[in-house]
Every structure is written in C-alpha cells, then in structure tokens.
C-alpha cells in the first residue's frame, strides 16, 4: 500500500531541501563570500551569481508548496546538474562536482519517488 502523498516524512524531506537551498541561494549575494570569485572564474559575470541565487531560493520555496514541489525539485535538480557540468567542463574541477552531482541524483530520485506514489 502506498504512503499518502503528504506524509510527515515527505514534509520533513521537502523542508530540509527547502532550507538547504534557501541558504545556498542566500549565500550567493554577499560580496565578501567565495562566490564572486567562483562566478568570475566561470566567466559569465556576476549577474549569473545573482540569477543562480534567485533560482536556488525560488526552487527551495517551490519545494515547500505541495502543488509546486515537483517543479521546485526539477528546477533544483537541473541547477545542480548544471553546476556539476560547469565544474567539470568549464572550470576543469571534476572532483568538486561530486557534491552538486550527488544533489542532482538525490533530488531527481526524490522527485521520481514522489511522482510514482
């Protein structure tokens, strides 16, 4: 028998994901953080740092709302896949892509299991 879609475990998991990505997104904004240098190395300009921060915060908020959780999870999964690809192919740091790659896999798996209940 399938679990109810909005079980307590689902809420806790979505809450943890939301909290993490709101924090990750918020960290992109201060000028004295590590992120300005990172995004300078990426080569797309600081607008991309702000855009990424907004996308992560938006994805975190969408994950909290039951009707938009799948869209939020998909948005965050694509963001993490993009981060892994940038680390590997643009910055040449494949070892650093493990974290974002793991987030991509975890978010994708969680989204898939929620859709198949």
Image: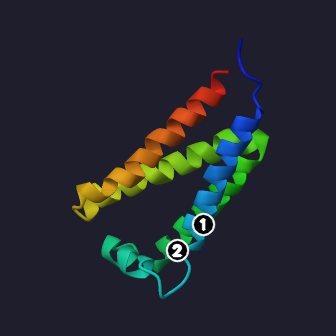
Left or right placement of residue 92 versus residue 99 in this view: left
Residue 56 image-quadrant placement: bottom right
Residue that extends furthest to the left in the rendered view of this protein:
92
- Viewer-closest of 99 and 36: 99
Left or right placement of residue 83 versus residue 91 in this view: right
Q: Residues within 10 Å of mark 1 (few under 14, many from 20)?
A: some
- Viewer-closest of 82 and 16: 16
Picture residue at 31% right of the left edge, 75% below the top: 41
Per the image, the residue denoted by label 2 is: 28
Q: Are marks 1 and 2 in contact (CB under 8 Å)?
A: no
Residue that extends furthest to the bottom in the rendered view of this protein:
32
Q: Where residue 35 appears, x then y in whole percent?
A: 43, 76
Count of labels in the image: 2
Residue 36 image-quadrant placement: bottom left
Front: mark 1 or 2? 1
Per the image, the residue denoted by label 1 is: 23
Picture residue at 78% right of the left edge, 39% below the top: 67
Q: Is residue 19 above or below residue 47?
A: above
Q: Where residue 106 appears, x then y in whole percent?
A: 49, 40
Q: Which mark is residue 92?
A: none
Colouring method of the image: rainbow
Mark 1 or 2, nearer chain start? 1
Q: Where residue 95 appears, x then y in whole percent?
A: 25, 56
Picture residue at 69% right of the left edge, 50% below the top: 15
Q: Residues within 10 Å of mark 2 (few under 14, many from 20)?
A: many
């Amino acid at each position: 028998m399938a679990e109810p879609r909005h079980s307590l475990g689902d809420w806790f998991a979505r809450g943890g994901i939301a909290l993490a990505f709101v924090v990750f997104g918020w960290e992109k904004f201060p000028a004295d953080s590590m992120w300005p240098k990172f995004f300078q190395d990426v080569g797309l300009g600081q607008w991309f740092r702000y855009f990424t921060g907004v996308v992560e915060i938006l994805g975190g908020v969408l994950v909290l709302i039951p009707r938009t959780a799948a869209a939020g999870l998909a948005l965050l999964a694509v963001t993490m896949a993009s981060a892994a690809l940038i680390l590997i192919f643009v910055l040449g740091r494949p070892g650093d892509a493990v974290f974002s790659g793991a987030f991509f896999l975890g978010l994708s798996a969680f989204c898939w299991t929620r859709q198949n209940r």
